[in-house]
Image: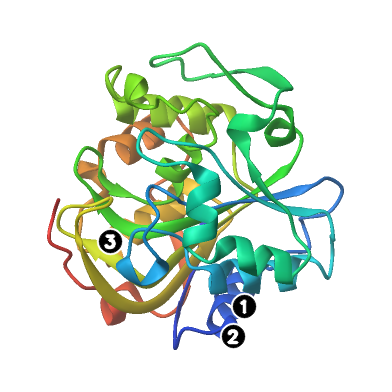
Amino acid sequence: MSARVAIAKGERCHDTVERAVKLSGGVEHLEGKPVLIKVNFICTEKWDSGATTDPLLVEALIRMIEEVNPDIAVVESDANMTNADKAAEATGMLEMCERNGVPFKNLRKESEKVELTCPTGKTFNSIKVPRIVAEGHIVDAAKLKTHETTGITLGMKNMFGLLPTKWKFRYHMRGIDRVIVDVNSALSPSLVVIDGFVGMEGGGPVGGDPVRMDLVIAGRDVVATDIVGAEVMGFDPAKIDHIRMAVEEGLGKWEREIVGETIESVRRRFRPA
């Protein structure tokens, strides 16, 4: 059976997010354990820069998920250039979390960690992640944008941010696409929602130009969802190393069922980084 990926086009509002998620299969499967909504805070720029996850999209997810599971947190980890707590405040994510009674957690501050096996073993045989990551549902709230090293950064690359160390450049030196595949072999999101209200082209993931797309892409299979995201951006997913390697390693398939909008009706060729 092909993985289902939904594309919803519409104004920046909760309804557009809800349509994408419902078309992808809904949130009823997010029961039984805590839900962690993993956002993308590569910098402190706001959502309309195209660099960071839109708080409105996350709020829409919270409103949907709390109907089936009230145990929700929004999470991110410090990165080379960014303090996640400062980014949460600067982007408006922290205010949104407080207004909805949902905590924001910096994964770097989580002291209890567990070791997970990486079945692909391309660079690492195992990784250490916070226990809450290993024991929760991960909702991967990624951004639709280019990346100077990996070509694009969507759901699979956003999962890399679950690693709690600040100095992530060390992983880049080991071959970032291979590391991304290893992380995704150890951790699989329960839901992927790509924020395409405003994407980024050119010098991503930080220094590119914003692109208004008015899109949300959602699916339960991170590889399939990234394949669709790449095609929407005008890239050949077979030429994106971490996507190609993920398929080769059996983490996903090229075949996918697309519901909602068609790729052709929403495609815009993004300028590469």
Q: Residue at x 26, y 35 (%)?
A: 241
Which mark is on residue 15? 2
| 6 vs 163: above or below | below
Question: In the figure, is residue 258 to the left or right of 118?
Answer: left
Instruction: Please count the marks in the image.
Output: 3
Q: Amino acid at mark 3?
A: Glu
| 120 vs 33: above or below | above
Callout 1: SS: helix
Of residue 146 and residue 218, the one placed in the foreground of this image is 146
Question: In the figure, is residue 211 to the left or right of 74?
Answer: left
Assess disc 1: are there few (<14), some (14-19) or many (≥20) residues with their C-alpha within 10 Å of its C-alpha: many
Callout 3: SS: helix
Q: Position of residue 61 (x, y in %)?
A: 65, 68
Q: Residue at x 34, y 59 (%)?
A: 51
Read off the residue under disc 3. 231
Q: Position of residue 10 (x, y in %)?
A: 44, 87
Between disc 2 and disc 3, whose residue precedes?
A: 2
Task: Kindly indicate whether the residue at mark 1 contacts the one at mark 2 (C-beta within 8 angstroms).
Answer: yes
Q: Position of residue 262 (x, y in %)?
A: 36, 77
What is the residue that sits farthest to the top in this orientation?
Answer: 125
